[in-house]
Amino acid sequence: MVAAFDDFAADLGTPLRDIAASVAAGEDFRHIWDTLPAIAFDYAVAEPAAKAGRFLVVPGTFGWQDVGDFASLAGARSNGSGSDVIVVGDSTKVHPNNSTGIVVGSSGRIITVLGMTDVVIVDTPDALLVTTKDHAQDVKQIVESMKEQGLEGIL
């Protein structure tokens, strides 16, 4: 696996080694993580490695859900009721009332969601995103716009 990163995504291989070393040493690795290019593992490594005969597919009898957006994350975390707010983070800080959707909280603030359907809230220390599951894929456009404005530091 490590060799595949070197061969097919060298810009990921070295920083990932540095992150592993930081984790092993009990050190903070966020400054390294922030430098990683935003590219999916399957696209950067798995597909080219498989095409080169370096990775194989092994059949399995386990379930799989591709979590590529907030709606699929909510589905993966759902308790099946479909009528509540899925919380990623400290659930004691989120107070939903008559709402559905997903809240990702890492700012430490109290988040109250009142009477909203299919809401997506991502609360970080330096930014707040409020949208709907239907518009969650549009976040990519916002990220590009923020980059153009020189706001990469909060992404």
Image: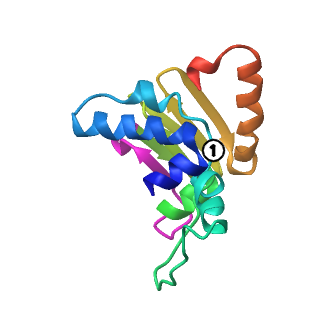
> Can residue 54 be seen?
yes
Q: Nearer the viewer, residue 118 or 135?
A: 135
Quadrant holding the N terminus: bottom left
Q: Nearer the viewer, residue 150 or 76?
A: 150
Q: Residue at x 57, y 37 (%)?
A: 11
Q: Position of residue 85 (x, y in %)?
A: 51, 52
Q: Position of residue 84 (x, y in %)?
A: 52, 57
Q: Residues within 10 Å of mark 1 (few under 14, many from 20)?
A: few
Q: Residue at x 45, y 48 (%)?
A: 87
Q: Secondary structure at mark 1?
A: loop
Q: Amino acid at mark 1?
A: Ile
> Can residue 98 be seen?
no
Residue for badge 1: 39
Quadrant holding the C terminus: top right
Q: Nearer the viewer, residue 17 or 103?
A: 17
Magenta segment boundaries in residue numbering: 78-93
Tell whether position 81 is magenta. Answer: yes
Identify the image quadrant of residue 29: top left
- Residue 92 in the figure: left or right of residue 137: left
- Residue 95 in the figure: left or right of residue 73: left
Q: Position of residue 135 (x, y in %)?
A: 75, 45
Q: Is residue 33 above or below residue 136?
A: above
- Residue 112 in the figure: left or right of residue 130: left
- Residue 22 in the figure: left or right of residue 48: left
Tell whether position 92 is magenta. Answer: yes
> Which residue reaches farthest left?
25
